[in-house]
Structures are given as structure tokens and as C-alpha cells.
Image (cartoon, rainbow, N blue to C red):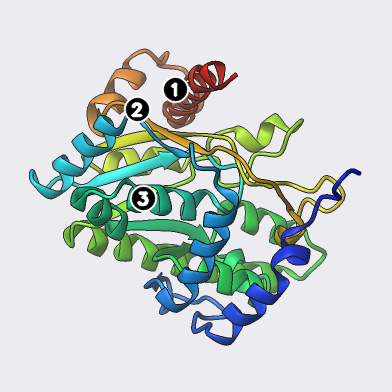
Amino acid sequence: MEVMSETLREKYGSVFAEMAKLSKAAAKIDENKVYEEANLNTRKYMQAVLDENFLPESGLGNIENFKDFYNKVVNEKKSGLILMEHYTNLDLPAILYLLNKQGEPWAKDFSSRIVAVAGMKLNEASPAVRAFTEGFTRVVIYPTRSLDSVNAKDISEEEKKAEEQRARKINFAAMRAMDACKKRGQIILVFPSGTRYRPGKPETKKGLREIDSYLRLFDYMILVSINGNCLRINPENPEDMLADIVAKDVVTLTASPVINCKEFRKEVLEKVPADDPDPKQKTIDKVMEILENLHNEVESKRK
């Protein structure tokens, strides 16, 4: 007898209800609420979800690259950036979970230093999604895609200008918060596509040109591919995060060698023609190319 697939809401609705009771995060983001420390009371629930769905073979690939990157940040006092593929809302929990499962002191400390850049939708979408998200330290931004959708709405110019002003204030405050994180030795994690990859929609795997500014602001980065996932976007309801289909899987996060951000950017831009209309996009295109190659290399070994 075939077992019916369950959505995140169906399987873990009671868990989300418990997390929502413990929620403290802001339901509406403004420039004074862009940095949010992890709520460890809700994180333990996410830990249980991952324990149940990440198969025992799950782990980190190229562990030496993770460790080399950690040493650059902690021992050499350099600023560190993680650019990671994005398939599901378990991607951020996954890297923290698998670092902690590694069991070594450096890996646990690495996990504790990660601060994710997250869109404000995760706070504002619903109490359940907010509770899901707040188990992890974040800097909240107003994504370009969100502002584009506002501008496409049938609202007055005054309302659009007000929202643009809100976006500027939030993102300026977010940049200041990230700078403070760097000075504290925290590691910033960004999903360069800015959204989860949806099968059959290659545009959702395209890197955002804004990522070029991160390459200018950080010393070193690693790129992390994700193979396997325990949530599958529900084709019948792709925008509802809690409608994702739950599935047990082997999840592997694989790190590239450590990359000097400024040297990487310089090498890419030197090859871009002088009349190129958008050189910044070329730097992130190269990042996404490396991630795709790393993903495919790992996937070929999994099969």
C-alpha cells in the first residue's frame, strides 16, 4: 500500500503550534528590528524534525574546507561569507545541524557564529513560519524581489514611495548590522539566488547582482552546495512554505576551497568586456557556475 506524502503542515502542525507559543520575533520588520538572535527554545523543535528526516549518511563534504574557512575567520581574524545553494527552508537549519553533528569543538563554534541574511517575508508571512525561522540568528533585509512585487501592485505612487523608503531604511540598517557581525567574528550566510530553487524554473537559480556588493565587503568565502533535501516544494502550492512535502533523505553539504573575495571579483571583472552593460552580474554568475559544478560533481557520486 502506497504511503501518502505529507506536507510540513500536516506532519508537524502540532510542532509549529508549540513553537508559535514560544515565539518572540517581530511580526513586522522595520529598521530597528533587523538583527534577531536565535530563539533556542524554538530551535530544539527544529532539531527534532531534522533528526527524524535526515538519514544517518547525511553530513558535510570537503570537511577540510569548512575547517580552513573557520581558521581564517577565528585565528586570522578575517571576515567570512558563506554563499550557499537554496532548495528548501531546511537549508539553514541543515548547515548548523550538520556542523554540530560533526562533534568537534571547532565545528560547534563555527555553527554558533553563523548569521543568515533572511528576507522579511519569513517574519511577516505567518506566525508558524516566523516561529520556524526564529530558531536561527538572522539579519533581516527587504529583498529587491519583494519591492518589485510592490511596484507591480495597483496602488498609489505615494504608497509605492513609502514602501521604497521603508526598504531603504531596513536595508541600510541591515548593512550596519552585518558590519557589526563581522567585527564580532560572526560569519554571514547568504543564499545568492535569493529564493528557493523551483524545478522547471531556472530563473529561480539565477544569482542576484546585489551579491557583488558582498564580495567587496568580505575577505574570504566558501561556496556550499546542497545535495538531497527533506522538503520538496509542493507544485500545487509553491508559495506556501508549510505546504512543502516532507521526505526522508541523505543530505550532503559540500564546501568549495576557501576563496579570497576581492581576488575572485578582480579576476572575473578583468575578463568582462569594457562595454558590458552589467559587469556585477558576471561576478555572481561565476559564483552560481561554481556552485552548479560542485553540486553536479557530488550528485554524480551519490547516484
Name the mark on residue 290: 1
| Residue beneath disc 3 | 101
Q: Residue 116 location, x and y as percent? A: 41, 56
Placement of 35 over or under 221, stated as above or below: below
Which amino acid, mark 2? Answer: Ser
Callout in the foreground (3, 1):
3
Q: Amino acid at mark 3?
A: Lys
How crowded pointer 1 is (Cα within 10 Å; few <14, some 14-19, many 20+) is rated as some
Task: Say which of 21 and 120 sits in front.
Answer: 21
Local SS, label 1: helix
Q: Secondary structure at mark 2?
A: loop
Query: Which residue matches tag 2?
Result: 256
| Residue 162 appears anywhere in the view | no
Nearest to N terminus: mark 3 or mark 1: 3
Amino acid bearing label 1? Ile
Left or right, residue 12 beside residue 224: right
Quarter of the C terminus within the rendering: top right
